Amino acid sequence: MQDLKHLLPQWLKQLAEQPLAAKILRFAATGAVSSLVFGLVTLAALHGLSLSPLSATLTGYLAVLPLSFMGHRRLTFRSDGVLAPEFGRFCVSFIAGLLASLLAMHAVTAWMGLTPVYGIALAILVVPVISFVIMSVWVFRP
């Protein structure tokens, strides 16, 4: 990433030099890559393997789990903690994020009567914040 800094706007370079801001930017970058892989795997499972939407989604989540863990462990939080306990805590936080997404979708569609796009938007806004906090204070403890 250091060799690509010259491509960034000045305000983003300054932001990246702040410890918390830099960690948030690394979290967002890792999350973006994980999301892209999740989407591609889910689409491949839907269309290439003809899995149901639920099965394809679970396949995508399982496929991205190791990538997301290693990305956040090495890049976002730069952890040198013990691998197995961190992975266990990460799996718990990963499942919590999945459950929060499902709850957001259910709340928006079943309780509020809105279309699923609002559930997606709510999950996109809320789940990363919850995940960042959980990973910061519990999964990859300083």
Image (cartoon, rainbow, N blue to C red):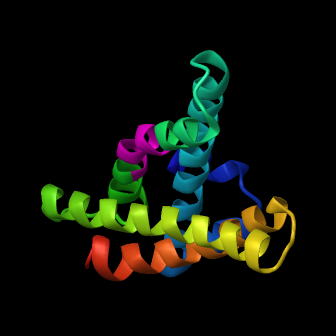
Q: Nearer the viewer, residue 37 or 92?
A: 92
Q: Is residue 81 above or below residue 61?
A: below
Q: Total label count?
A: 0
Q: Is residue 89 left or right of residue 93?
A: left
**Image: magenta residue range:** 61-68
Image location of residue 16, percent across then percent down: 59, 69
Residue at 87% over, 71% down? 114
Residue at 43% over, 69% down? 96
Q: Is residue 67 magenta?
A: yes
Q: Quadrant of the C terminus?
A: bottom left
Residue at 39% over, 47% down? 65
Magenta part, dominant SS: helix
Q: Quadrant of residue 128?
A: bottom right
Q: Is residue 65 magenta?
A: yes
Residue 40 visible: yes
Image location of residue 103, percent across then percent down: 60, 72
Residue 10 visible: no
Q: Quadrant of residue 51?
A: top right
Q: Nearer the viewer, residue 122 or 68?
A: 122
Residue found at the very far right of the displayed protein: 114
Residue found at the very far top of the displayed protein: 48
Q: Nearer the viewer, residue 129 or 48?
A: 48
Image location of residue 139, percent across then percent down: 30, 71
Q: Is residue 50 left or right of residue 67?
A: right
Residue at 50% over, 61% down? 98
Image location of residue 78, percent across then percent down: 32, 62
